[in-house]
Amino acid sequence: MSSNEDRVRAVMTAPLGEVLVEEQPVRPSQDLVRRWNLPESDKQALLQWGLPPDDHMRPLFQAGADPELVPNLAGERERLAASPGERLYTLVHWGPEALQLRIGAVAGTGCVLKIQPKPTTTDDLPSMLRKAHANLYHPSVEFFSSSVAQFVETSWRCHAAHGIAYELWQDEPAHDRPWEEHEAWFSRLHDCERIILEHIERIDRHVRADDARTLWTTVVTELTHPGN
């Protein structure tokens, strides 16, 4: 039987048509996508592959033809990710609805960004946690993928890797097992993370797998550490 690491490597490198799982893809309507101002390759990716059904990164395509997301360019980090006047088409709602995190595609370029109403800072934390996170700053706009097509491909490959990572978590040694078993298990888990991130970087050269602030790093950590 192939190891978890070999299986993760396979879903990150196989032709995309072989990676799609049995669940029904979520696709926007063809008529709608044809009216969006996106590169043709991005439109084709949405129509051919759609996005995987996911409870955390929920595909919820906007219903209108005009881009509806307006980035809040609150500071320097936001202005590095987006330009004044840019608008985005909503593709995904990410995480709890109360956070209002949206993933969208910039009209014209197809660059995929995460948008939230305002930056998250220390002031948004309970008072007891503020001292430990004095420098907290999550920008209201962050880069996700260079194009919709790359976002679609990466989403499907991560979705397929999720099942493999979940199986690995089922193999977690019991608390009374020797530390060597736990160490070997953690090593396998981190190997899976490394493989996924390295191949995400291969798909999109503007994604930095070694940068903890990369949003795909957050996604992969959520895949390989369920319940965190």
Image (tube, grey):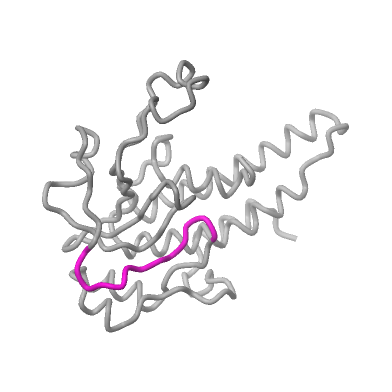
Q: Residue at x 70, y 58 (%)?
A: 2
Picture coordinates of residue 78 (x, y %)? 23, 39
Q: Is residue 23 above or below residue 209?
A: below
Q: Is residue 32 above or below residue 147?
A: below
Q: Quadrant of the N terminus?
A: bottom right
Q: Quadrant of residue 184?
A: top right
Picture coordinates of residue 84 (x, y %)? 12, 47
Secondary structure, magenta segment, majority class: loop
Picture coordinates of residue 220 (x, y %)? 52, 47
Residue 64 within the magenta-colored segment of the rendering? yes
Q: Which of 97 and 194 lies nearest the eye of the viewer? A: 97
In this picture, residue 223 sits left or right of residue 183: left
Residue 151 within the magenta-colored segment of the rendering? no
Q: Which of 70 and 175 lies nearest the eye of the viewer? A: 70
Picture coordinates of residue 146 (x, y %)? 28, 54
**Residue farthest along the top direction in this orientation:** 131
Q: Residue at x 33, y 53 (%)?
A: 145
Q: Which of 167 and 188 lies nearest the eye of the viewer? A: 167
Q: Residue at x 64, y 42 (%)?
A: 189
Q: Quadrant of residue 55?
A: bottom right
Range of residues picked out in magenta? 55-67
Q: Residue at x 71, y 47 (%)?
A: 169
**Residue farthest along the left direction in this orientation:** 85
Q: Which of 118 and 92 lies nearest the eye of the viewer? A: 118
In this picture, residue 44 sits left or right of residue 162: left
Q: Quadrant of residue 149?
A: bottom left
Q: Quadrant of the C terminus?
A: top right
